[in-house]
Amino acid sequence: MPNVHREGEAFRYMENAKGLLKAAVIEDNIYLDKKPVREAFGTAYLAVLEAINEALIKKGLTRKELPKSVDGYMAAIKKYLSVTRTGKLVRDFDSLYDTLHIAGYYRGLITRVTMVKDAMKDTDAFIKKLLT
């Protein structure tokens, strides 16, 4: 299969992340099983990376030029995607990295339903900001 970028991949990942959460058991506003929640956070983080990749490709970068690390993504956002010097997009990405990848996926620290839903809502907003 050729290494071709597919439009809308970020949205597909987000739908997958939400699907993982729908199957998870909730009791007293807490997800009882961390595994599907961690998987959902990991998938949502991949959605963020796909959104950034899509936006960078629209700016003219090739697949080979796409970032390969968190620091690379930060630098690419600053260089190609920030429309103002406020750094809001970089701060949003940094916050999503900490929430989705570190706390949610890697450490499995977020199991409260309202916190998970807020993180998914923030992720959706970030993706839409980049791609719509």
Image: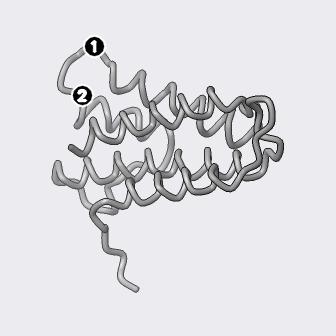
Looking at the rendered structure, the secondary structure element under dot 2 is loop
Extreme residue toward the top, this view: 86
Pick the quarter of the image with the N terminus. bottom left
Which of the 4 image quarters holds residue 98?
Answer: top right
In the shown orientation, is residue 35 left or right of residue 14? right
Q: Amino acid at mark 1?
A: Thr
The answer to whether residue 46 is above or below residue 2 is above
Q: Which mark is residue 30?
A: none
Check disc 1 and report the residue beneath it.
Answer: 86
Which of the 4 image quarters holds residue 92?
Answer: top left
Q: Position of residue 30 (x, y in %)?
A: 77, 33
Q: Position of residue 129 (x, y in %)?
A: 27, 35
Q: Residues within 10 Å of mark 2 (few under 14, many from 20)?
A: some
Foreground residue, 40 or 113? 113
Q: Position of residue 115 (x, y in %)?
A: 62, 27
Pick the quarter of the image with the C terminus. top left
Q: Tell me the residue at 32%/55% (across/down).
A: 65
Which of the 4 image quarters holds residue 110?
Answer: top right
Q: Tell me the residue at 62%/27% (across/down).
A: 114
Foreground residue, 60 or 48? 48
- Determine whether label 2 and label 1 are within 8 Å by CB: yes
Foreground residue, 17 or 45? 17
Q: Amino acid at mark 2?
A: Ser
Extreme residue toward the bottom, this view: 1
Q: Position of residue 130 (x, y in %)?
A: 27, 40
Check disc 2 and report the residue beneath it.
Answer: 82
The answer to whether residue 14 is above or below residue 91 is below
